[in-house]
Image: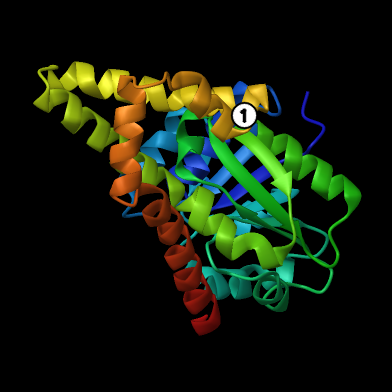
């Protein structure tokens, strides 16, 4: 069943849990082919992995020793320390890092010259198998490594290969983007509540509206402007609402948020 090999996780946060769940659900692997190292104080993550049937331990070296593919899912600031710890046993392993801001160069410098590296930028909807991920190959990653990475990431949503120079704006768009969308959902619901809808109904309708609209843009391949025009009748309610958004600078505000987040990502990467 598992042509990809054994998979390990260094770190057991929510993204790691989401990936493990997705890999198992998609039939790419079985729980017994997974292993994760989790900080002993992180009882919630320990329990979450154990509920999936995944072997969970508190040391990092056994994860690397017993895995063909190792996901680096610890906090970015401890990545160099963790990789230095496992460097002596990292030969001929594929390391896939989901740590924000940690470059291919940093990953490769802290591992064996015979290790292969891929850097991934996932986002939080991966928790419900609706993630939007991109990946970058390191200097020694093979075509098969890329195929395996794509197959794994598609188990938790969509996936594309990109150049590393694009990761800062992608982080600002799809990495930070869910926060912008959550604010949009909250704002849509607030307006509906002011007009008389019950709060729980307003959240249900707003979230489904955003979800369906995203699917329509993605699957129809129509320009968003065309889809917007299809909803907008002359002198209708949508036209009135859109005028209000334009008058308040909605478009430039959202675009500016992505630009500001990109600049901040570059500052963080530069500092690292």
Residue at the far right: name it.
143
Is residue 219 depicted above or below 179 in this figure?
above
Q: Nearer the viewer, residue 85 or 4?
A: 4
Q: x%, y% of residue 91? A: 80, 65
Q: Nearer the viewer, residue 61 or 51?
A: 51
Residue at the far bottom: name it.
271
Identify the residue at image location x=42%, y=43%.
178
Q: x%, y% of residue 231? A: 46, 20
Q: Is residue 39 visible?
A: no
Question: Is residue 56 toward the left or the right of residue 92 in the image?
Answer: left
Q: Nearer the viewer, residue 142 or 230?
A: 230
Residue beneath disc 1: 218
Is residue 84 depicted above or below 96 in this figure?
below
Identify the residue at image location x=49%, y=49%.
57
Q: Is residue 206 visible?
A: yes
Q: x%, y% of residue 88? A: 72, 72
User: Based on the displayed image, in which of its 4 quarters is residue 187 positioned?
Assistant: top left
User: Based on the displayed image, in which of its 4 quarters is residue 84 positioned?
Assistant: bottom right
Secondary structure category for the residue under label 1: helix
């Amino acid at each position: 069943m598992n042509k990809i090999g054994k998979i390990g996780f260094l770190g057991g946060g929510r993204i790691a849990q989401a990936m493990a769940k997705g890999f198992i659900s998609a039939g790419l692997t079985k729980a017994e082919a997974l292993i994760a190292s989790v900080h002993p104080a992180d009882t919630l993550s320990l329990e979450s992995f154990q509920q999936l049937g995944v072997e969970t331990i508190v040391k990092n070296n056994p994860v690397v020793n017993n895995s063909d593919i190792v996901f680096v899912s610890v906090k970015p600031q401890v990545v160099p320390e963790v990789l230095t710890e496992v460097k002596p046993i990292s030969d001929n392993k594929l390391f896939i890092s989901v740590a924000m801001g940690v470059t291919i160069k940093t990953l490769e410098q802290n591992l064996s010259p015979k290790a292969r590296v891929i850097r991934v930028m996932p986002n939080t909807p991966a928790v419900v198998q609706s993630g939007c991920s991109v990946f970058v190959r390191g200097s020694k990653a093979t075509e098969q490594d890329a195929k395996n990475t794509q197959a794994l990431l598609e188990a938790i949503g969509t996936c594309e290969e990109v150049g590393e120079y694009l990761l800062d704006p992608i982080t600002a768009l799809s990495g930070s983007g869910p926060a912008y969308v959550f604010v949009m959902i909250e704002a849509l619901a607030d307006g509906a509540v002011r007009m008389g809808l019950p709060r729980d109904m307003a959240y249900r309708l707003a979230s489904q509206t955003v979800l369906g609209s995203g699917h329509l843009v993605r699957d129809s391949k129509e320009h968003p402007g065309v889809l917007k025009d299809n909803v907008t009748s002359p002198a209708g309610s949508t036209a009135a609402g859109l005028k209000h958004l334009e008058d308040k600078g909605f478009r430039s505000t959202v675009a500016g948020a992505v630009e500001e987040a990109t600049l901040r990502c570059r500052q963080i990467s530069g500092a690292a």
